[in-house]
Amino acid sequence: MNQFTLSIDGKEVTADEGMTVLDAARRAGVFIPTLCHHEKLEPFGACRLCLVEVEERGRTRLVVSCVYPASAGLKVTTRSGNIDRLRRTILELLLARSPHSPVLEKLVAQYGAQPGRFEKQASFCIHCGLCVRYCAEVKKAQAVGFIDRGVRKEIAFVPEIASQVCEQCKQCFELCPTSYLQAAYVLFRAQAGLGSE
Amino acid sequence: MSRLNNPQDLERLRQQLQARRMAGRTVISVCAGTGCLALGAQEVIAAFREELQKRNLTASVDHKGTGCPGFCERGPVVVIYPQKICYLQVKPADVPEIVERTLEQNQLVERLLYRLPGDGRQAPREEDIPFYAHQQRWLLGNNMLIDSKNIEDYIALGGYSALARALFEMKPEQVIEEVKKSGLRGRGGAGFPTGLKWEGSARAPADKKYVIVNADEGDPGAFMDRALLEGNPHAVLEGLIIGAYAVGACEGYVYVRQEYPLAVENIVLAIEQARSYGLLGENILGSGLCLEVFVHRGAGAFVSGESTALMTAIEGRVGEPRPKYVRSNIKGLWNRPSVLNNVETWANIPLIINRGADWFASVGTAGSKGTKIFSLVGKINNTGLVEVPMGISLRKIIYDIGGGIPGGKRFKAVQTGGPSGGCLPESLLDLPVGFDELTEAGSMMGSGGMIVMDEDTCMVDVARYFVEFLADESCGKCVPCREGLRQMAAIFSRIVNGQGREEDLQTLQNLAEVLKSASLCALGTSAANPFMSTLRYFREEYEAHIKEKRCPALVCKSLTAYWIDPARCQACMICLKKCPVGAIAGGRDTIHVIDQAKCNRCGTCLEVCPKRFGAVNKLAARDVPSAPPPEERTIDRKRKET
């Protein structure tokens, strides 16, 4: 496999062709926060927490590292005043939706986020799509999906499929960063008249 | 009709059609665009058919429903050729008179002509009307000449000759070179150079490539793409076929929103007709080029106008943007090179091929060439579609073409670029209209929406409207757009309700920054523009709302009140009876008083108060004087009468 080097936070790092900047950083032990990334799944690029600055041919721009392809000679910066400020606001926005998620709380201190900054509208789900994508891409079951759009978007179990496959699987449960999925599943079963297991 | 097997067949057909039309025949064109149809154009067309039959004129006079000429304000529009007499706001009842006076007696029906503002002189022909006279109608000019449902009308005017020229006289690289040289930039919003986009696709190796028309026009108040696709679908199709030849595509899509039924109908028909004439499908005009074109109907999502979302939707999935850093002209539809251009961009291609890049580039500014169609709406006298040379000033569009602001009101701002654009103030009215100029001023060209606002517009409320529109239309995939717009909408709702906080402007700016820098697609990255531009040019209005709890334009209901001036009230009972919430107290001889706690600020009292009294006033809620004491509220009518 073709290997090349790039620089991440001033460190020379080796990467393989086809790797994203996030892959390269992880392999080199550089921490970049993510919420919607999963190594078994296609890049989703939705939480935007993994954004970094890249410098290529003299131009600097902000990109999300989970999608941006690593390339030879690329200069990557994973922390800066600007990056931290953006991540902080993104965290604050998510905390308004999911106030007590342990995954988010872990990052709060690191970026100095204020959990109460935005009007609270708890939905608990942060729309990372891990359950939806894992079910579709790995399990090929599509038992859970997104419904509606924009600010009204939420996850929902597809009754016809979920009632057949979920009880035996539940592999997505441990992926959920907020445990909302488990609650949604209990509700779904109750509404579908399936009772508890 | 037999297939056209070579360019000579096409030219022969054109000459035959021309000859048939040139024989001094009178043609009555009735705009059959959506706007005029809504105003009864179909009935006008039927009335002409009936009247011509009744008077035995069908042999010498043609009549047809055509594309939209743009003067929607005065529809239904009728133009009689060859004299080019333009009748406005024509009703079926006017038709017998038009036929008798104009067709039989060669006289004008004066009451249906445009009257020039000022001296009131009549302007009998299109070019005499200032609305048209100041335009440069390269694309819309043919609309009134073409029956949108008849390919022969397009061919008669030289349609598909650019395609013949490209196929038989130019190599694909030469076509791309010509488009590059013309300086044509994408008319859909971002203004990316079209030729460069094509070149990228042409060079990308692939087993299959695509060309796509983006007709998912969704900006509030914008309808230029609809008019083109409804009125002159073959111009768009011809551009698309030329593009397919240039980049080597064999499959094309027209992504058109379901909410445009007539555009869907006309483009579907155009594709069928083009195919039967040998201008689409296998071996086009005998050149060996093959292109199949399919119509994909969008199901009502604004975000599907974004290029990657549009392609995802064509692929049959939910129309959400893709996170990627490879352009769609290299990896687009089904991961293959795909050239996606807006309706208006495609319609420009035949012009460039036929008349040359130099001709095209002779009009415009350094960075923006050719013409641009705007839909001029809002507080403007001449609502409609206007096509103007790039570089024209906003003032010329609004005053010379648009006829200024109705009701003697003062101009306040013009919104360009739709929800991704911004509001420009009076001080920028002389700004030349171009991609770079508008962006620099904090707005953008966008696809061509132009909303004019007068002094009665609250700029904070305008920004709130766009933020709510986008919060509703966001696909909800990325956090900055979904959650950022939700919070911006919440803050705006506070501000217009008089609960704005000192830190709100700072928070909004912080959110705007996150949207701009961190969103997944252009909907998010540009979503804060309406806020940022109104803050830049109308900051004092934000401060009035937040600090003084006052809406200077008296628009925001929570900050505005209606008040009855006791000195002018005649206790006539009209407003009292009409108030839908029973908020007005008083009697036949008792001065009326509005209970501010009950009032829902609908404004009915102001509307119904007789002009000669003028007792009801609209004012800032905090300035409402206290009601007069009961003993001063009786009107002594006897004394008044003496």
Image: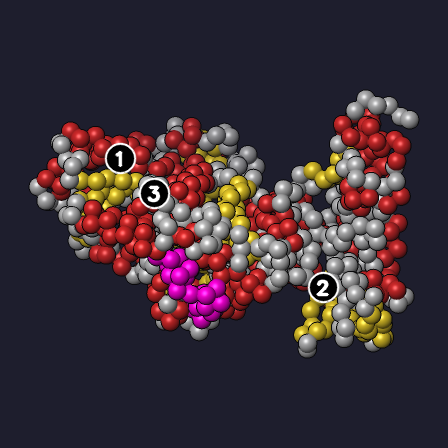
Residue type at mark 3 is Ser
Q: Residue B119's spot in the image, x, y percent? A: 18, 55
Amino acid type at mark 2: Val
Q: Chain of mark 3?
A: B
Q: Earlier in the sequence, mark 1 or mark 3?
A: 3
Badge 2 crowding class, 10 Å Cα cut-off, few under 14, some 14 to 19, many 20 or more, is many
Disc 1 crowd, CA 10 A, few/some/many (<14, 14-19, 20+): many
Do the residues indicated by labels 2 and 3 lie within the same chain of the protein? no
| Residue A90 x, y percent position in the rendering | 75, 56
Which chain's residue wears label 1? B
Q: Are marks 2 and 3 in contact (CB under 8 Å)?
A: no
Q: CA distance from mark 1 to mark 3?
A: 34 Å
- Secondary structure of the residue carrying tag 3 is loop
Residue at figure coordinates x 88%, y 64% from the top left: A27
Query: Is B624 rendered above or below residue B289?
Result: above
| Stretch of the chain drawn in magenta | B160-185
Q: Is residue B488 magenta?
A: no
| Front-lying residue, B313 or B238 | B238
Subunit that carries the residue with mark 2 = A
Reading the image, the residue beneath label 3 is B2
The answer to whether residue B6 is above or below residue B566 is below
- Which image quarter is the N terminus of chain B in? top left
Q: Tell me the tag on residue B44.
A: 1
Which numbered marker is on residue A63?
2
Report the front residue among B124 and A113: B124
Per the model, the C-alpha gap separating discs 2 and 1 is 57 Å
